[in-house]
Image: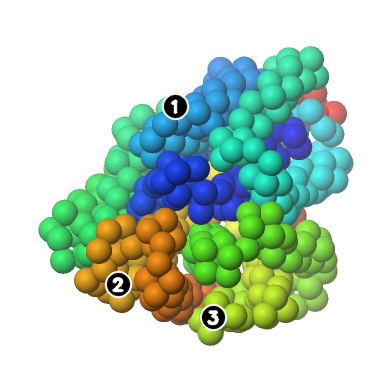
Amino acid sequence: MVLCLFLVVLENTVLNVALRTLAEPGSGLGASPSQLEWAVNAYTLVFACLLFTTGVLADRLGRRLVLIGGLLVFGLGSLFAAYADSPAQLIGARAIMGVGGAAVMPVTLSIIMNVFHPREYGKAIGIWATAIGFSVAGGPLIGGLLLEHFWWGSVFLINVPVAIVAAVLAVVLVPESRNPRAPRLDLVGVLLSIAGLALLTYGIINGGENGFGAGRSWGAIVLGAAVLAVFLVVQSRIAFPSLDVKLFTNMRFSASVIALGVAFFAAIGSMFFMAFYLQLVRGDSPLAAGALMLPAAVAQIVFAPASAKLVERFGPKLVAAAGLVVLAAGLAGFMVFTAGSSVVALEVAFFLIGLGMAHVMPSATSTAMGSVPPEKAGVGSAIGNTIRQMGAVLGVAVLGSVLSAVYRGKMSGADGPAGKSLAGAVAQGGTSLLGRASDAFVSGMHEAAMVSTVVALVGALAVLVWMPGRRPAPGGRGEQAVAEPDSSTPAAAG
């Protein structure tokens, strides 16, 4: 299960260091900034929208069956991505990978809950969650190493043998299990959520690429918001919703998942443009860029386990709010960076981002799970995962669009690809043109960093207003709540 989780989470981070290469017309695909945003978001968007659906399907059809199927789909999508001939093909392949990843991630936790005795849940889930930290840490480094020695497709091709090995191990080691009381599949809700989020994301990205004066951008944004509004209305009225909107009437739960979404919006969105800054403005190699991002991951691995003790002493409100403030401090550093900023300053900023995330995620997650009744634990966990992923999608879309809009404004009048992206300016060449493009990119980066900093601070304010100061009231099962095992499983019987 750790291997499966490592594989699907790795795909959220390994692509960052390959973005510059994918943007190059010769060695890459010549992808535009908006196409690169879609290459990142296609995976995360599909992943987030299908988390509820795959969880229900796994409970009905069999968790091992869905896990193996998800691994094979993920591997097939990775193979298509490795040999994509155009940005459109890469985006489509990434969407296929998102389908597979959505089938794998929730099922790994369900299988752990089925296999282990309740007394071992805490230890097993702790080991399982560690895979996320190692994925965040290893993604940029693995991607950098591969790009140093192979072509860009290697960052996807490496997934194929790992997925096959994981599938074989699942056949040999994992017992099949189902939930006889699994809810019905809400197909209408799934389709509405995908359509609404896709339209909203398209409008934001298109506005950054072509300007928000165009009717197409605002039309897509308004239509997407309207579809999502219909989705919420439908979800509040049907017997078996994909998203139990009634949980959001609990302000503790709402504040917790908002904190998660805000943190991922700011952190993941910022990592997207920082990958370009490191490689195109500073001139770092993919491997060096991955190494420079490492402090963010190391801080999460080192400090996340200790955050539980801080929550016990100070309460989740102060810990989560402080985490968001520290995250904002790291993001604020990007507002003053230039092409000549020191490595020490970069490392401090990345470390602060990781340190902030290490205190937001455990405290907000435990509070969210402790705020829902036992029978809703699985639903609460799925909502938290979905909000987290959607925060990442919108972070890449919004911050990438802010940067693109500022860059285009600064480069107005420039001929050729330089007017559209910094990667285009690098390909076009010319010392004066490249200097102007780098300055324009840095200006856009400052604006995007300011937006992410403000969002993180607003999230901290929401936490201070709505999140409980100590343990949540026993409407759930306390902060260490975990999903209930099936009554039919050996673990539950034990």
Q: x, y percentage for residue 104?
A: 61, 31
Q: Quadrant of the C terminus?
A: top right
Q: Which residue is mark 2?
A: 411
**Closer-to-camera residue (391/338):** 338
Q: x, y percentage for residue 481?
A: 71, 51
* C-beta proximity under 8 Å, tags 3 and 1: no
Q: Which residue is mark 1?
A: 184
Q: CA distance from mark 3 to mark 2?
A: 18 Å
Q: Which residue is mark 3?
A: 338
N-terminal of the two: label 1 or label 2? Answer: 1
Secondary structure type for disc 1:
loop
Q: Quadrant of the N terminus?
A: top right
Q: CA distance from mark 1 to mark 2?
A: 53 Å
Q: Residue at x 50, y 28 (%)?
A: 83
**Closer-to-camera residue (315/125):** 125
Amino acid at circle 3: Thr
* C-beta proximity under 8 Å, tags 3 and 2: no
Above or below, 158 against 416 in this view is above
N-terminal of the two: label 3 or label 1? Answer: 1
